[in-house]
Every structure is written in C-alpha cells, then in structure tokens.
Image (spheres, rainbow, N blue to C red):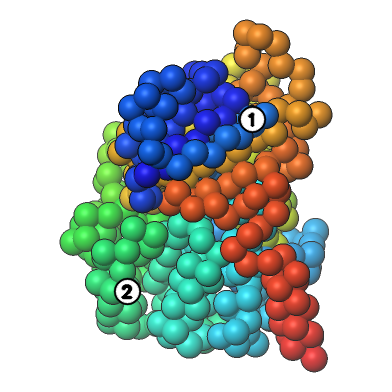
Amino acid sequence: MKVIFPKYLFYKNKFYEDYGVLFEGDTITCVDSKKNLLEKYPQAERTYLTEQVLLPGTVNAHNHCFQSLLRGIAADRPFLEWRDRSLYYYSPRMSKEDIYNGALFAFGEMMKRGVTTVGDFFYLHNFGRESDEAIIQAAKDLGIRLSLNRTMYDWDGAPAGYVESVPQAVENTLYLAESYKDDPMVNILPSPHSLHAATPEMIQKGHEIAKKLNVKFHIHVAEEPFEVEQVKKEHDGLGTLEYLDRLGVVDNSMVIIHGVWLSPEEIDLLGEKKGGLVYCPSSNMFLADGITDIPRMLKAGVTIALGSDGACSNNRISVFEEMRMVSLLQKAKTCDALCVNYEQAFQMGTENGGLLLNFRIGKIEEGYKADFVGIDLEDLSMMPLTDSLEQMLPNIVYSMEPTAIRTVMVAGKPTVKDGQLITVSEREISRRVKETMKRLNS
C-alpha cells in the first residue's frame, strides 16, 4: 500500500492542493485529502512530490516503434517516396535485436515525455511471432504499458516481412491474445492495416477477432487521397468508410487512424456507429496528408484519442506535443478559437486513449491503474501560476516543455525519476541504437 502526496493533484477535472492518491499494487484504491489519508492509512509507504502537479499518464494510441530508427531519413519527401526510401528500404534488413532496440528506443523516449501507455501498430513480422515478442519484451524491460495493435497485412507489394496470409494473421493474433490475456500490462488488438494493404477478407477477420475477444480493432483509414480515389474507382464511387460499412465492420469496435479524407457524411456515420478515431496531427502535417475535421468528429460523437505515429513521420513522440497540435491546427484551419479547447485536448491524450486501447487508464480515480506523471511547477514553461490555478491546465497543454516532466510511474512503479529513465539507462539505449544503425548502414 503506497500513497503519493504532490503539491497539486488533478482529480475529477480539477486541481486539488493537499490531496493524495493511494494505490495497492497497480490500482488506485483511494483519492482523498492528505489529512484523511494520513489518518486512515498511517502504515502506507509515502512519497512526497513537493513542487509537482500529479497528472494521469498520457496515452500514445498510435505509434510504429521500429520507425524511431528511421527518424530523419527521407525527410521532406512525398508520401510514397518517403515510404519507399525509409520504411521499405530499411525494415527488411532489421534483425530481431534491431526490432527490440527500436522498441526500447521509442518507448524510452516517449516515457521521458510522459507516455505511460502506448498502442504500437506493429507490422514488421520479419520473424513471425518472435517479432511481436521482441516488442513486448522491450515494453516489459522499460516498464511501459503496451497495447500491441498487431497488424494484419496481406498486400504483396510490401516487403515480405509485412505480409501474412489471412489464416496466418488470424492464428498469430489469437495465439498472442491467448498468451497475454491475464497480463495487465499487455493487450493484443487485431489491426488490419488499411484498405490498400489488407484485403476485404483480412479486414473482416480482424473485425471478427475483435468481436470474439470483446476488444477494439484498429485500422488506417483515409490517410491519403490515393486510398480514397482507389476505393471510389473500384467500388461504385463509395468513400472509404462507406465501403468498410458495406463490409460490415463499422461499429463500436472500430478505431480508425487518421480519417483525414472522410466526407462529412462518413464522419457522421462513424459517430452513429459509436466508432473511435486516433488522430495524429503532427504526422499528418509532416507527411502533408491534410487536416482531419476534428470539430465535425466531436459534433458527431466520435471518441478521439491522440497518437504520435512513427518517429520518422513526426518526428517527436510526445502526447503533450499532440495535445498542443490538435488544438492549434484546428484553430488555424477553422479560424475558430473555440473549436478544440485545452480540456478536450487533454482528455484526448489521456482518458480517451484508454478507452480506445481497452485499458482502464487515463484518470486518477478509484479503480483506475496507477499510471502517473509528475510535472515540475518550478519549470519556467509552467509559469506563471496564480492562486486561482486558472493557468495550470492551459500551461500543461500549450506551453509545457519536456524539461518539466520529472516523475513517471506505471502500474505503481517508478520509471522516470528526476527526469531520467531508471528502468533501462539512456546510455544503454543509446549504445543499442548506435549498434543497430551501424548494422543497417553497413
């Protein structure tokens, strides 16, 4: 039994002074005043974060960890050229150790930025299920919570390591789901890649698995105009989501990634069917994809979470960064300062990510997992703060720099202390990345 006493605690959408959070094992059991907690639980192990505000950990709901090794390669190129010169060129060369190193690198960097849970949309199956296990092992070594959004991919135009038959993809996904069904730190979600990289049968099987396991399934939808044009040409002028609805997979288990080029009617359809969206604003900007209509998504009732996407298409992997980007980009597009506010952006980066990854996370409330981020109130990027605390959440979303992130805990265990990783040393991660890049470029 442990209790944390920060300077301020974010609880039920407000900041409380002289409050604390009690947790047993990996789960929050009580949130109350400091006075009450000390009286009720005098035996609890205490941690004091005297000049920090304690927040729920952020959730990176869409990432491709191996792409962190490709950051800066083929930058400022059109989408297909970027894909061919970075992803398709380097990923077939990656060994199991390289895949592990890339995951350790990606997860370590994002954890330092306050990410406590990641949804990794992983399709680099050069070594079958052993590739997946390498990602899971890296997450466990670092201490991050992982939703392995295991990609189901059968377009033969991609590198061979991406491609599986439908039966293979189903067997491997179900095997992993069964293997980790009792692991509170790992979820396995079926994730047919997209309409251009997964056949209709593959997509339907992914949906079928999601229904069987009572989980979400993730799929890239309408990221680029070429996918929309291809679907319209081949399927009687239907939009991408309209065609997916014809396949019978648009429902409350669906989580689309990007959704940049959906029509207003398709957005309304997604909302009506209670689907979700993971929005990756920085990646969409970097790849010149366009701008997803987030105000329409909100109006339609779509649950929206945030993702960094891979680090070679962003090139940062911070959810606090994406909170800032979603709000600013939508304001710029709509010329409406009220279209996405800081409270909505913060919810997208925390609670909503948990909903779309099937984890009970993203809030500091009883019954939720003990995943926390402590922010240094003395960091200049968090100032000024008046006694009313009116500026606290706006500063977290709009001005806070990574230097302010001092403490990270996942499942009640510290992973970052005084701004430094403590589960795997940064020097070790750096050494591994250098070795991998030397191999890839030899």
Camera sees residue 236: no
* Residue 24: percent from left, percent from top: 35, 45
From the viewer's perspective, tell me whether residue 382 is left or right of residue 280. Answer: right
User: What label sits on residue 176 in the rendered view?
Assistant: 2
Camera sees residue 94: yes
* Residue 90: percent from left, percent from top: 68, 80
What type is the residue that disc 2 sits on? Leu
The answer to which of 441 and 111 lies nearer the viewer is 111
* Residue 31: percent from left, percent from top: 39, 28
SS at mark 2?
A: helix
Q: Which residue is mark 1?
A: 50
Q: Quadrant of the N terminus?
A: top left
What type is the residue that disc 1 sits on? Thr
Q: Residue furthest top?
A: 388
Give the distance between the C-alpha atoms of the residues marked 2 and 1, in whole angstroms: 42 Å
In the rendered view, tell whether residue 239 sits above or below residue 152.
above
User: What label sits on residue 41 in the rendered view?
Assistant: none
Q: Residue furthest bottom?
A: 442
Tag nearer the camera, 2 or 1: 1
In the rendered view, tell whether residue 202 sits above or below residue 396.
below
Name the N-terminal-most of marks 2 and 1. 1
Q: Quadrant of the C terminus?
A: bottom right
Which residue does the image show at 54% across and 52% down from the upper left? 414
The answer to which of 398 and 153 lies nearer the viewer is 398
Which residue does the image show at 52% across and 20% down from the upper left? 18
